[in-house]
Image: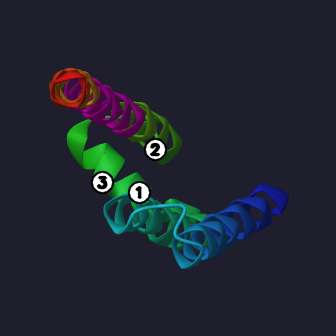
Amino acid sequence: MKLTILTAISGLAVLSIIFELVRRRQLREKYAILWGLVGIVVIPLAIFPGLLNPLSRAIGVASGVSLVLFLAVVFLLVVCIHLSWEVSRLEEETRTLAEDLALLRTEMRERVGQ
């Protein structure tokens, strides 16, 4: 029972933190939607922990808890891959901007020197 309450409180905390970060413009909406969905899924599963047992039995997983842990690992793996992709894209964009800035500075120095 204590774990159920703790999980529900954690889900509500995630939702309120996400809301506050979006309100302060510290988290973009596309990520807020993702984490908001996590909070929305966690709360009913916390209140009704047996909801996943029929689904887990149907796909051959030992228990609903095992299924939740597996899905959480897969979810975090997908988030890590997505963030790695975003970082790679931003690094390339930063490099391109730095090159453009260097070319503009060189051009300005040449014009001022004439």
Give the number of the mark in front: 2 or 1.
2
Q: Which residues fall within the magenta stretch?
A: 75-93
Q: CA distance from mark 3 to mark 2?
A: 11 Å
Q: Amino acid at mark 2?
A: Val
Instruction: Check disc 1 and report its element: helix, strand or loop.
Output: helix
Q: Is residue 57 above or below residue 73?
A: below
Q: Position of residue 110 (x, y in %)?
A: 17, 21
- Going from N to C along the chain, the mark reached first, 3 or 2, is 3
Q: Is residue 18 above or below residue 92?
A: below
Q: CA distance from mark 2 to mark 1?
A: 8 Å
Dot 3: within a 10 Å radius of its alpha carbon, few (fewer than 14), some, or many (20 or more) residues? some
Q: Nearer the viewer, residue 23 or 39?
A: 23
Dot 2: within a 10 Å radius of its alpha carbon, few (fewer than 14), some, or many (20 or more) residues? some
Residue drawn where x is 31% and y is 26% of the image: 84
Residue drawn where x is 40% and y is 66% of the image: 37
The residue carrying mark 1 is 52
Instruction: Check disc 2 and report its element: helix, strand or loop.
Output: helix
Q: Is residue 90 above or below residue 46?
A: above
Dot 1: within a 10 Å radius of its alpha carbon, few (fewer than 14), some, or many (20 or more) residues? some
Q: Nearer the viewer, residue 3 or 85?
A: 85
36 drawn magenta: no
Residue drawn where x is 46% and y is 40% of the image: 63
CB atoms at circles 2 and 1 under 8 Å apart? yes
Q: Amino acid at mark 1?
A: Leu
Q: Quadrant of residue 108?
A: top left
79 drawn magenta: yes
CB atoms at circles 1 and 3 under 8 Å apart? yes
The residue carrying mark 2 is 68
The residue carrying mark 3 is 55
